[in-house]
Amino acid sequence: AKQVVAVVGRPNVGKSTLFNRVAGKRISIVEDHPGVTRDRIYAEVEWLNYNFTLIDTGGIEPESKETILSQMRRQAEIAIETANVIIFMVDGREGLTGTDREVASMLRKANKPVILAINKVDTKEHSPYYYDFFELGMESMVETSATAAYNIGDLLDEVVKHF
Ligand code: GDP
Ligand code: MG
């Protein structure tokens, strides 16, 4: 079966930017009818000799009145159920938040490979919060810039190691 990679993370960390960059034009447009998200959340990706489906869990529509935390929990559950490898994205400019810690603890219990993408690191210097992120206990960490396309290849290399 085809490998599935899911991107999970708080709103605004850069999930969709990464998704669009990695997906290029190979995005499957989800049917626009009631009950189906209008967002483009699935993409078929080719990286080196690997093919996989990438899911942007942030594009899954929230249930009405859902808090950020419960939305995040639902996204993490979907990722845990469907993905072979999970990219957990955090914001290298904002640093670690309580929601990040909650999501990390859900993901750690899932026994699936998780790559921490510390995004918005647009220069060669570490995020000022880089060492704080070790607390999340993720097996690998990559600093990325989704907008500047920095280290995206390194991130995908880490992902495909687990296929
Ligand atoms: P999402 O809510 O996690 O899907 O986040 P988006 O992909 O929509 O990005 C949120 C905002 O962060 C947008 O204004 C992006 O342009 C910006 N952004 C995303 N990645 C980066 C990055 O690597 N560096 C910087 N400086 N901004 C970024
Ligand atoms: Mg998004």
Image (spheres, rainbow, N blue to C red):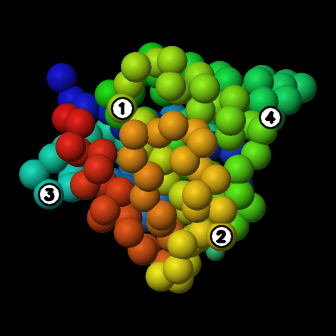
The residue type indicated by label 2 comes to: Pro
**Residue ranking furthest to the left:** 49
Is residue 61 visible in the rendered image? The answer is: no
Q: Give the alpha-carbon distance from disc 3 to disc 1, as whole Å.
A: 20 Å
Q: Earlier in the sequence, mark 2 or mark 3?
A: 3
Q: Quadrant of residue 6?
A: top left
| Disc 4 secondary structure class | helix
Cβ of mark 2 under 8 A from ligand 1: no
For residue 48, the mark is 3
Nearest-to-viewer mark from 2 and 3: 2
For residue 84, the mark is none
Q: Rate crowding at label 4 as few (under 14), some (14 to 19) or many (20 or more) other CA atoms within 10 Å.
A: few
For residue 113, the mark is 1
| Disc 2 secondary structure class | loop
Please tell me which residue is depicted at 48% across the width and 64% down the height of the picture.
143
The residue type indicated by label 1 comes to: Pro
Give the residue pinned by disc 4: 68
Q: Give the alpha-carbon distance from disc 2 to disc 3, as whole Å.
A: 32 Å
